[in-house]
Image (cartoon, grey):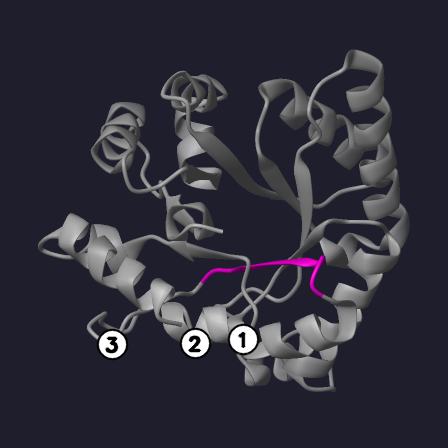
C-alpha cells in the first residue's frame, strides 16, 4: 500500500472552510481525511460531501456508542454519506457491534452501495493504566483490556479496531493480517507533549502492524506542515 494510502490526516478544526483548505493543500499527499466530533458538530454532513467533491475519502470518527438500534441507524446514515470508514465503541458490546455490521451489510447489498469499513474503538490513547484502574475500575492491564475488546470486535465481524501502537503488535499476532489496525496518537520525535499519553512514532506504528496511522497536530502544528508530512512519509517508507 502506498504511503499516501496509509496516512489519515485529521481535520480537528471547527471551521468548514478551513478544513476544506487543509484538504486542498494536502490533496496530492493524502487520500483519507478524518472528520471528528468537533468538525462534524460545527459543520454537519455537508463537510463530508465537500471532501468527497475533492475526490478524497472520509474516516468519520464519531465513535458511536448507544443501544444497538440507535447505533445501527446512525451507521446507516454514515453509509448514505458515502464515508470510507467509521467507528463505534467496542464497549457497547457484541450485540451492538454485530447488529451495526449486519444492518450496514444488508443496506449496502440492497441499495448497491460500497460498504464502509467499520472499526471498533478500544481504549482511547489519552487514557493511562492508572485512570483505567482508579477511575474506571478495570483491574487488569491496558494490553489485556485492549486484546479483549479487539476479540469482541473480531467476533462481531468488524473490519478492525482503533488502538494505540503499544497494543498493535499483540492485536496483529492474535487476529491476523486481515484485521485492520488504525493507530492514532502518532507523535514524531520533534512533536511537543500534549494530552495524548500512549503515543508512538510513525515508524514504530508501522512496525507494530498498523494499516493506517492518524496524523493531526504532528503535521498541522508544525512551522512547515508539508515538510513535516514529507519527513513522516519517508519514515513510513523505511519502516
User: Mark 2 — residue?
Assistant: 204
How far apart in space, not on screen, are marks 2 and 3 (Cα)?
A: 11 Å
Q: Residues within 10 Å of mark 1 (few under 14, many from 20)?
A: many
SS label for mark 2: helix
**Towards the viewer: 237 or 172:** 237
x 74%, y 86%: residue: 139
Determine whether 159 is above or below 179 in the image.
Answer: above
x 42%, y 28%: residue: 56
Which is in the foreground here, disc 3 or disc 1?
A: 1
x 42%, y 50%: residue: 2
Mark 2 and mark 1 in contact? Answer it, CB < 8 Å. yes
Mark nearer the N terminus (2 vs 3): 3
Q: Percent position (x, y) of residue 103? A: 85, 30
Residues in magenta, as a range: 177-184
User: Mark 1 — residue?
Assistant: 208
User: Mark 3 — residue?
Assistant: 189
Which is in the foreground here, disc 2 or disc 3?
A: 2
Amino acid at each position: 500500500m502506498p504511503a499516501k494510502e496509509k496516512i489519515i490526516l485529521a481535520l480537528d478544526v471547527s471551521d468548514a472552510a478551513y478544513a476544506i483548505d487543509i484538504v486542498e493543500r494536502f490533496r496530492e499527499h493524502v487520500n483519507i481525511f478524518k472528520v471528528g466530533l468537533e468538525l462534524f458538530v460545527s459543520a454537519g454532513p455537508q463537510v463530508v460531501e465537500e471532501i468527497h467533491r475533492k475526490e478524497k475519502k472520509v474516516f468519520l470518527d464519531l465513535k458511536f456508542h448507544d443501544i444497538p438500534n440507535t447505533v445501527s441507524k446512525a451507521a446507516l446514515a454514515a453509509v448514505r454519506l458515502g464515508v470510507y470508514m467509521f467507528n463505534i465503541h467496542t464497549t457497547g458490546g457484541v450485540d451492538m457491534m454485530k447488529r451495526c455490521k449486519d444492518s450496514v451489510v444488508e443496506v449496502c447489498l440492497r441499495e448497491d452501495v460500497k460498504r464502509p469499513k467499520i472499526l471498533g474503538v478500544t481504549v482511547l490513547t489519552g487514557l493511562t493504566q492508572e485512570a483505567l484502574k482508579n477511575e474506571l475500575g478495570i483491574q487488569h492491564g491496558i494490553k489485556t483490556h485492549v486484546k479483549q475488546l479487539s476479540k469482541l470486535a473480531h467476533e462481531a465481524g468488524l473490519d478492525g479496531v482503533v488502538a494505540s501502537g503499544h497494543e498493535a503488535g499483540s492485536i496483529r499476532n492474535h487476529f491476523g493480517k486481515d484485521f485492520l489496525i488504525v493507530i492514532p496518537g502518532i507523535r514524531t520525535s520533534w512533536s511537543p507533549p500534549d494530552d495524548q499519553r500512549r503515543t508512538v512514532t510513525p515508524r514504530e506504528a508501522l512496525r507494530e502492524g498498523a494499516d493506517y496511522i492518524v496524523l493531526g497536530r504532528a503535521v498541522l502544528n508544525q512551522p512547515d506542515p508539508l515538510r513535516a508530512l514529507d519527513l513522516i512519509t519517508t519514515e513510513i517508507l523505511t519502516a
